[in-house]
Every structure is written in structure tokens, then in C-alpha cells.
Amino acid sequence: MSENIIILMIGISTFLGALGLGALIWAVKTGQFDDHSKFIDAVRHDNEEDLRDAVSMTEKKKNYKKKKKAKQNDMPPD
């Protein structure tokens, strides 16, 4: 490959990277990633059954981790 092609490739990739960075900064400044209704909708659609399911899943995970850790401690040394 000649030097001209490498310089052209570096120039184009730098330009595209700067263009992408500019688009990201513009999107953040104009609030494209803000979702104000997300938390309101989450609270609005939560009910007691969903909350009980979340608590029971958390308890199951804790118990599983305890059992797994106890099982690892009971293994004989090599």
C-alpha cells in the first residue's frame, strides 16, 4: 500500500470519528437520551404481586449463593 492510501484512510477514519462524536454530543445536549416518563410509568404499573416476586427472587439468589459458597468450602483439598 502506498503512503497516500494510508494517509487517506487515516483522514477519513478521523473525520468519521469526529462526526460520530459530534452526533453524540448533540444528542446529549438536546436530551435525546432523557426518558422522564420511565420512572413514572414504572411506579404506575407496579403492583404488590410484582413487588413480592422481586423480593422472593432476591431471597432465592441469596440462598443459592450461600449454598454454593458452603458447597465450595466443603470440598476436599486436591
Image (tube, grey):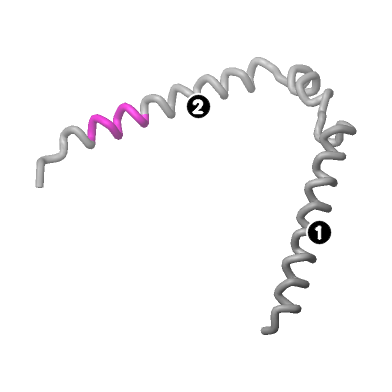
Q: Quadrant of the N terminus?
A: bottom right
Residue 4, position as x, y percentages in the image: 75, 78
Q: Around disc 2, counting alpha carbons within 10 Å, would you say few (fewer than 14), some (14 to 19), or many (20 or more)? A: few
The image shows residue 15, relative to residue 58, as above or below, that is: below
Disc on the earlier residue, 2 or 1: 1
Residue 32, position as x, y percentages in the image: 86, 36
What amino acid type is highlighted by mark number 1?
A: Phe
Is 45 on the left-hand or right-hand side of 57?
A: right
Residue at left offset 81%, top offset 59%: 15
What amino acid type is highlighted by mark number 2?
A: Met
The image shows residue 46, relative to residue 9, as above or below, that is: above
Provide the secondary structure element on which disc 2 rests: helix
Is 68 on the left-hand or right-hand side of 37?
A: left
Of residues 73 and 29, the one nearer the viewer is 29
Residue at left offset 83%, top offset 46%: 22
Which label is found at residue 15? 1
Q: Are marks 2 and 1 in contact (CB under 8 Å)?
A: no
Q: Which residues are magenta?
A: 64-71
The image shows residue 70, relative to residue 12, as above or below, that is: above
Provide the secondary structure element on which disc 1 rests: helix
Which label is found at residue 41? none
Of residues 28 and 45, the one nearer the viewer is 28
Question: What residue did someone put label 2 on?
Answer: 57
Residue 27, position as x, y percentages in the image: 85, 39
Q: Around disc 1, counting alpha carbons within 10 Å, would you say few (fewer than 14), some (14 to 19), or many (20 or more)? A: few
Residue at left offset 15%, top offset 39%: 75
Give the quadrant of residue 46: top right
Residue furthest front in the image: 3
Residue at left offset 75%, top offset 63%: 13
Residue 68, position as x, y percentages in the image: 30, 34
